[in-house]
Amino acid sequence: MCPPGSLLLGTAAGLRAPEGEVIGGGRLDLAADEALDLPMPERDQDARPASAEAGPRPRVAAGPRPQVTVIGEALIDLVPGGEPRSFLALPGGSPYNVAIGLARLGNDTTLMARLAGSAFGRMLRERAAAEGIQLDAAPHASEPATLAVVSLDADAQASYDFYVEGTADWQWTAEETSRTPENTAVLHFGSIASWTPPGDEHIRGLASRMRDRGDVLVSYDANIRPRLLADRGHGRELVERCVRLAHLAKASAEDIGWLYPGQCTDDVARQWLGLGATVVVITNGASGADAFTGDGPAVHRPARKVTVVDTVGAGDSLTAGLLASFVRRGLHSPRQLAGSQPPQLAAALDDAILVAAFTCQRAGNDPPTLAEFESGLPQ
């Protein structure tokens, strides 16, 4: 049986997408049609997220729940099926996954994604709606959906072959990004849509306007895909342009290693703080995660040992868990985040890592619900 919201596709030798979409400074540890005719795809390795022991559960903030808006790509992951050379089509894409994670954790979540009118686009829209995500600001796109073919190695590490030419996710217009809810308290952007033309300039323009408002917390996840960026220098320039717009900037150690070869992640984090970020979070797989601020040493949280089924969506779950924790702890404004203390950051990292750990133990992007999160991982 296929999971709800999925589509089982045939073997690679006869696979055709529906509706004409042919697949083409120190640490501080705190305890708190027939054959496929495909172009050569772009390939990239996904980084395993950190996992750690969970700290105290966040308190629910009083009053109306803050509106969290996520903008970026919503694509289809083709993951290995039960039979050889078969694939299961599942909704995915980093911002889309972040929105799913936020909604499951009880947040009022709006997704701004350009969703195609084809079978794949309808799958994306229907899955998001079923999760309780608001889609009033998600344009109906005429272009086909982006595809990512997922491969898993012997360690369940995910890698991706992307088919991105002329697809819906990169065609943003100024009018479309103007639909952002006025009551947005947190804006999250990043990943491929934040640096893929022609729409990337409109996403960055929105992030700039939200930061200039002064009352919106802007979050950014680099989520680097080297083969889609190709040129390291250009990629670094684009990423730093986004970091300048963010209060919270997140990246993996692998992202940093590709962007800044030979540089220490701590030094890069401090550099990003100098660009304008208030908090920089770096994840480093089994070594844990670190939060950097302009004051004092980094706050480090250790990895949590779990049995990994695969890493699809785990980094996005960590992002969702981090944002959800900041919201629930009342740290979701620029001023509040700037005033956060090391124990608060440590607890937020623990929350985020726990959310990612749930996802690592499941197939595909399947983040926990709020009830599961509050219960903790089974012993």
Image (cartoon, rainbow, N blue to C red):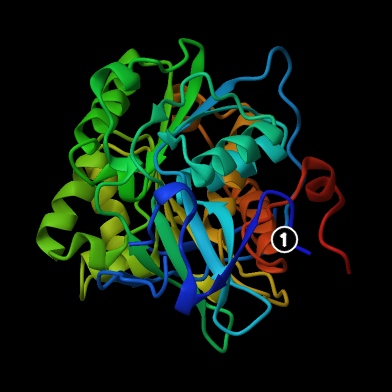
Image point 43% across, 34% down: which residue?
Answer: 113
Q: Residues within 10 Å of mark 1 (few under 14, many from 20)?
A: many
Image quadrant in which you'd find residue 39: bottom left
Tell me if residue 318 comes above or below residue 12 in the rendering. Answer: above
The one nearer the camera, 29 or 184, is 184
Number of labelled discs?
A: 1
Q: Which residue is mark 1?
A: 358
Residue 370 position within the rendered picture, expressed as x and y whole percent measured from the top left: 78, 41
Image quadrant in which you'd find residue 141: top left
The one nearer the camera, 175 or 207, is 175
Residue 31 position within the rendered picture, expressed as x and y whole percent measured from the top left: 69, 58
As drawn, is 126 to the left or to the right of 180? Answer: right
Tell me if residue 166 can be seen. Answer: yes
Report the amino acid beneath label 1. Phe
Image point 72% across, 60% down: which residue?
Answer: 358
- Toward the front, the furthest residue is 34
Residue 227 position within the rendered picture, expressed as x and y whole percent measured from the top left: 24, 68
As drawn, is 121 to the left or to the right of 102? Answer: left
Q: Secondary structure at mark 1?
A: helix
Residue 333 position within the rendered picture, expressed as x and y whole percent measured from the top left: 49, 23
Tell me if residue 6 comes above or below residue 325 in the rendering. Answer: below
